[in-house]
Amino acid sequence: MLGRDLILLFLLSWPFLILIVMATHLNIPEKRHHKVQHGQCSYTFLLPEIDNCHSPPSDYQVSNSLQRDAPAQVDHHWPISRIQELENIMENNTQWLLKVRNQTNRLEIQLQENSISTNKLEKALLLQSQDISNLREKNSFLENKVLQMEENHQDGIKAIRAEKLHVDDLLSKQSELIGVLRDQLSEAMLNNSMLQRQQAFIMETVTQLTNLVSQYNHIPVIPKEEQLSFPDCAETYKAGLTSSGVYTLYFPNSTESIKAFCDMDTSGGGWTVIQHRKDGSVDFHQNWKEYKEGFGSPNGEYWLGNEFVHQLTSQGSYILRIQLQDWDGNEAYSLYDAFSLGSEGNNYSLNVRGYSGTAGRTSSFAPTGTAFSTKDVDNDGCSCKCAQYATGGWWFDACGPSNLNGIYYKSGSGPPKYNSIKWHYWKGPSHGMKSVSMLIRPVDY
Ligand SMILES: [Ca+2]
């Protein structure tokens, strides 16, 4: 703002300066002085005295309109060269004045630009102030929130302290309870030892009484085993044990026993299971001794034993039922009206008659008289060893259309296998089975 004032002052003072210059160049002998005070500055004006001016010559033509229009009393005796010089000076001054005016204009433009940038800065300042105000508001909000959270935190701590006090209280109560329980326990232990002593006393009394009874009454005590000694599952069933399961059977005229599975459900029950396959869990490629005495588990897969079957079927007439199931869930059976095995000396040879059933129109069994063979005892009608070729122990002819003790393949699909479980006239040469059972029962059951 100070710059602008200076410029204005400068502009105002110029016309007077020109007048001063003109007065100097006119060389006016006597002058009038005018002084003007403006603030700290003072301006002095020197003006020519009209009375002392000479009139120009009569033929003089002025180029200056100001002079031309001037009053007629003007002195006309100035030389032309002097007027020319004055005009030149005037011209120079005018040009100088123009330059100054241009400079002034430029300064004004600059001033305007400065003003614009100042406005911009002011606006920016305003925006910054607004931002600061916003931030202050935000800060205040956050401070409030922090205060609120602190209050909440305090509440939480109070709740936890209360809970801790509660837990401490419970703990002390539990400790008291444990003390009471300990007391009760020691009391109970005392009682227990007293009871044990009483029990021992009672047992002693019972023993004494038993001794007295056996001494004076002489009543024979029959063992439970003898009461339930049956030679087969048919007798077991008749004795009232009608649930399928594992039972102890006794060799005829012997105290020697064997565990067997009794099928009390199939076709009237009373069946003694002499062979069973169902999952391939037992290896049936066994030798002569195992087939003679039996192997496997009566609860799962097993072979009851040739010796027991021989003895049992020598004592009475038995029928044989062969129960089959293939991998498609189809079931079939083969029934023989007469079945027995020869002695070991006769190679447990097969004796079957009277075939019927659904597992093929023709019996798949080897003919009567066929001896039993195992991998270590070859009694078959083949120059080969069927028990090794077809695996398992069986009544191989040469080698015959059946082998229920072959390898248990866990699927009926795939190419035929000669060593699989086989019952030829039901499912072809070597079609594996899912489940196989051989059951015997007295003819007169
Ligand atoms: Ca042979």
Image (spheres, rainbow, N blue to C red):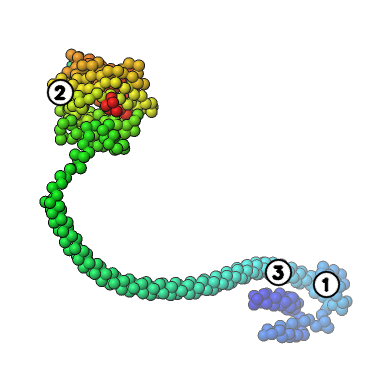
Mark 3 packing: few (<14 Cα in 10 Å), some, or many (20+)?
few
Q: Nearer the viewer, residue 191 or 54?
A: 191
Q: Quadrant of the N terminus?
A: bottom right
Sequence-wise first label, 3 or 2: 3
Gap in angstroms between the C-alphas marked 1 and 2: 172 Å
Q: Which residue is mark 1?
A: 66
Instruction: Name the spot of residue 81 as percent of width and height, x first.
Output: 76, 70
Amino acid, disc 2 = Glu
- Viewer-nearest of labels 1 and 2? 2
Q: Which residue is mark 2?
A: 344
Mark 1 packing: few (<14 Cα in 10 Å), some, or many (20+)?
few
Q: Is residue 97 left or right of residue 163?
A: right
Residue 109 sits in quarter: bottom right
Q: Nearer the viewer, residue 163 or 59?
A: 163
Gap in angstroms between the C-alphas marked 3 and 1: 23 Å
Residue sitting farthest toward the left: 215
Residue 104 sits in quarter: bottom right
Q: Are marks 3 and 2 in contact (CB under 8 Å)?
A: no
- Viewer-nearest of labels 3 and 1? 3
- Viewer-nearest of labels 3 and 2? 2
Name the secondary structure under disc 1.
Answer: helix
Amino acid, disc 1 = Leu
Residue under the image location 20 percent in, 42 percent down: 224
Residue under the image location 29 percent in, 28 percent down: 445
Residue under the image location 87 percent in, 79 percent down: 73
The relative height of residue 207 versus residue 109 in the rendered view (above or below) is: above
* Residue 391 in view (yes/no): no
Q: Nearer the viewer, residue 229 or 65?
A: 229
Amino acid, disc 3 = Arg
| Quarter of the render that holds ligand 1 | top left
